Amino acid sequence: MRVFIVTRTNQFVIEVGTQEPVVEIKRKIEQIHGVPVASQVLTVSGWELLDGLDMEDYPIVAEGTKVDLTIKPGEPHPDKMQITVKFSARKINIEVDNTDTVRSLKEKIHIVDNTPIKRMTLFFSGVELDEDFRNLNEYGIHDFSEIVVFLKTTNRSRDEPPTRKLSLVVQTSSSLLNAASIPLEMRDVNTVNDLKQLLLSRKILPADDYLFIHRQRIMRDSCSLRWHGVENGDCLYVFKGTVSRSGYA
């Protein structure tokens, strides 16, 4: 599909594939426009397109979409580190910046391995990385370090906090109800499908297939709001469509 890359002074068109990684789009822009990949920030409607995701992870991007390109002038390319993330039965290698925080490392692990962020406990050299907003280098993590991941148990009776009531806002796209903002109350153990059925039963949405987005990530119908990390007051975005291997319908 063709998308428009818009800068402060001009715009140009590039061809992208639905399964093409965001970082590959940035490499194309570097070849065409000369902007280094590390200096590029791509956004659509204020949402940043993350390097670790594919274009199909953003249902808001379609034929003819305008993608805003912001250039970070004078910002040096951060030093990169290759680290190993070790689970109980497997290992994965991840590239991080030396300015990454514990939280951003967890997000990268989630992107690569799909492990829920809230289940992760990270250790380095026997020390728990227990402060999400501390930089990795503050823990002495360096190139080729090994981070061990322990997964918190999902035993509801022992480890999960009691259910909570959440006040949410469901924001529809411009093609639905004229971009309406819909306040709702749900329990954090309710699934995305529960939310969908509530909206359909109240005739807030017409019968159709929908995608829900939270913090730039597509939500899974069978998983709870708690699993997705939804907090009180969060906004969920809804779009028409379904997820398939070939893209969005």
Image (cartoon, rainbow, N blue to C red):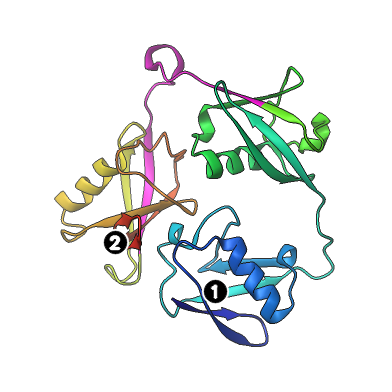
Residue 105 located left or right of residue 60: right
Q: Residue at x 77, y 43 (%)?
A: 81
Residue 82 falls in image quadrant? top right
Front-most of residues 172 and 242: 242
In the picture as drawn, the residue positioned furthest to the front comes out as 90
What is the magenta range? Answer: 148-172
Residue 56 located left or right of residue 92: left
Quarter of the N terminus within the rendering = bottom left
For numbered disc 2, what is the local secondary structure? loop
Front-most of residues 178 and 246: 246
Q: Residue at x 75, y 36 (%)?
A: 134
Disc 2 versus disc 1: distance between alpha carbons?
Answer: 20 Å
Residue 43 in the image, given as x and y percentages of width and height: 57, 67
Residue 244 in the image, given as x and y percentages of width and height: 32, 55
Residue 147 falls in image quadrant? top right
Q: Which kind of residue does numbered mark 1 sit on?
A: Val
Say which residue label 1 marks.
67
Q: Which kind of residue does numbered mark 2 sit on?
A: Gly
Tag count: 2
Can residue 3 be found in the magenta stretch? no
Q: Residue at x 64, y 68 (%)?
A: 26
Can residue 161 be found in the magenta stretch? yes
Residue 28 in the image, given as x and y percentages of width and height: 63, 73
Residue 5 in the image, given as x and y percentages of width and height: 58, 79
Say which residue label 2 marks.
241
Front-most of residues 70 and 122: 122
In terms of sequence position, does the residue under pointer 2 or pointer 1 come before the other?
1
Q: Is residue 189 above or below residue 233?
A: above
